[in-house]
Image (cartoon, rainbow, N blue to C red):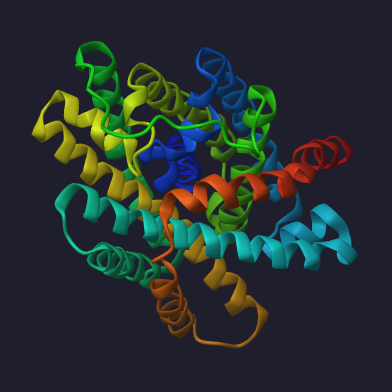
Amino acid sequence: MRWKTAFQVAATYVGAVMGAGFASGQEIQQFFANFGYWGMIGIILSASLFAGLGYIMIDLQERWRVRTYTQFFEKLLGPKWGPKIDILVSILLLIGMIAMMSGAGALFKQYFGLSTWLGILLTAVVIGLALWFKGEGVLWINSVLIPLKFIFCLGIGLLAILWGTQGDGEGVTQSMNPLIQNWVVSAILYVSLNITLAMVVFASLGAEVQRKGAKQGALLGGIALGVFAAVIGGALIRFPEAGGLEIPMVAIAGKLGNWPAFFYVVVLWLAMITAAIGNAFSLVTKIVGAGKVNYRLVALGLLLLTIPLAGIKFSLIVKLVYPVFGYLGLVFLPLLYMRWRKS
């Protein structure tokens, strides 16, 4: 039972962080690959922080016995600031969900030449099915889909680094993001952005992650995130000509042939789905916990709200909105550690 819980928590951690921006290469490009090999050292730093802070989050959640992320933030920040940050986090979850669905639309258009809205609608249907089964559905879908993502992302990324052929310039090489100009700051910002999402997902699952083995699962999840990021970052550094595309890792997988590109597209879509499910479930449980409303009606209403907003350009969300929330989330990194030491 302990190792099953560890595996589920690790998979959920990876699923919360490794969404459209991560597996597509957009996030890794912006936060790490733009700095070349210094960015790879940044990945090691961020993986260490993910593992340590993940352990602390689960430990605090077990001690505080919280069931929603609203309760978690009230314990972390106090009754005065907890509700204020709660609003900010809810906006971040909504933007994250929109980004995942927007990325699915961009993926369908870039690879299949199909309508952006078809990709968005199909993604919304899968999210809705997972939400229907509540917390167990979220853990189950992560336990099934995350290992598939791990195998294909890792395998195709490594093969591309070892045997991929240099292209003639599929896209425009990315310029440095004006909001992120130092590799150490970038690595910390990346953790602060994603640790907020992980806190929310873990807290929303409540008792589901308050079992023996959960803390070990958080450590394992942090290490797995570092391995994922290192492989994708290595591929992006080797093939800078793909950096200017909306979905650079699909172009890199295509250097190995049509079938590897197709499999990567499927895996990338799964990554978008798992991250969107984590965000959506957290939002729905928060709304349901705030008043006596029907869970499934709230889930349906949330999907109907996000579908039209998902037409915003995916790379624009990653480049501009994500770093801003990374700066805003910096307060959580030292605060988590201080609260943990004090308790």
The picture places residue 230, in percent across and down from the top left corner, at 44, 21
On screen, residue 227 above or below 340? above
Residue shown at 32%/21% (left/top)? 239
The picture places residue 144, in percent across and down from the top left corner, at 30, 46
Observer able to see residue 268: yes
The image quarter containing residue 92 is bottom right
Residue shown at 55%/58% (left/top)? 205
Q: Quadrant of the C terminus?
A: top right
On screen, residue 44 above or below 332? above
The image quarter containing residue 173 is top left
Residue shown at 15%/32% (left/top)? 260
Q: Is residue 111 left or right of residue 101?
A: left
Observer able to see residue 68: no
Q: Is residue 55 left or right of residue 229?
A: right
The picture places residue 21, in percent across and down from the top left corner, at 44, 44
Decide which of 314, 270 is in the foreground and name it: 314
- Residue at the extreme left: 258
